[in-house]
Image (cartoon, rainbow, N blue to C red):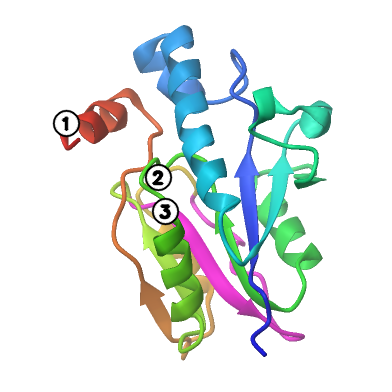
Amino acid sequence: AMTKATLLIYAKPPRMGLAKTRLAAGLGLTEARRVAHFTLARTMRTARSGYWTPLLYTAPDSALDDSIGGLWPATLTRRSQGHGGLTERLDKGLAEAQSGPVLFIGADAPDLSPALLRAAIRTLQTHDAVFGPARDGGFWLFGLNKGPRTRSPFGKVRWSGPHAMEDVWGNLPPHARVGLLPMLIDIDEANDWHAWNAVR
């Protein structure tokens, strides 16, 4: 039987000043919080609707008990993101994940769907890694098959910029077979939100 995939959701509560600082710079705090809540709600609905195991990696540690008005139910396993930058936080998730397909997502892509997660898992049956590319050079999903010799691809990555996906890809073994999913809009800044609404 196929190993059940593990889905690691990296998300923070949509509280004032905690999530989405770049978004708030362009939309104002109240609207940024509303958008963060909207994308988080859509992400959680998708993440909890499949045959994979969802694990919520959140920060700060005080958020581990939050229910976010039911978006994070008590049945959802939560883990601390730990300390350091995004590299260290993703390394922790990878180290703690069981062997088999492991997917990493954030909570910024409102068009994430159960079908896309299924496509990512299907891709890993014939590939070593999979990306869901974002329009800004980042990615809304990254997945790999974790085995006993898997090395982290998250070191020295230029996060939050146009090189994030290229850097992670460059850290994969030279002969890795890499699959690509459709490009989605990741909502990090005000113009991303306007662009997403424009194509509705």
**Magenta-colored stretch includes residue 155:** yes
Residue 132 x, y percent position in the rendering: 39, 61
SS at mark 2 in the image: loop
Would you say the residues marked 2 and 3 are in contact, meaning their CB atoms lie under 8 Å apart?
no
In this rendering, position of residue 107 left or right of residue 81: left
| Residue reaching furthest to the left | 198
Q: Quadrant of the C terminus?
A: top left
> In the displayed structure, would residue 3 be above or below residue 85?
below
SS at mark 1 in the image: helix
Q: Is residue 166 visible?
A: no
* Viewer-nearest residue: 114 or 61: 114
The mark that comes first in sequence, 3 or 1, is: 3
> Residue at (51%, 49%) from the top-left corner?
46
Name the residue tied to disc 2. Answer: 161
Quick one: label 1, few (<14), some, or many (20+) residues within 10 Å? few
> In the displayed structure, would residue 83 be above or below residue 29?
below
Would you say the residues marked 3 and 1 are in contact, meaning their CB atoms lie under 8 Å apart?
no
**Magenta-colored stretch includes residue 13:** no
Q: Is residue 92 visible?
A: yes
Magenta part, dominant SS:
loop
Residue 113: mark = 3
Quick one: label 2, few (<14), some, or many (20+) residues within 10 Å? few
Name the residue tied to disc 1. Answer: 198
The magenta span reads 137-158
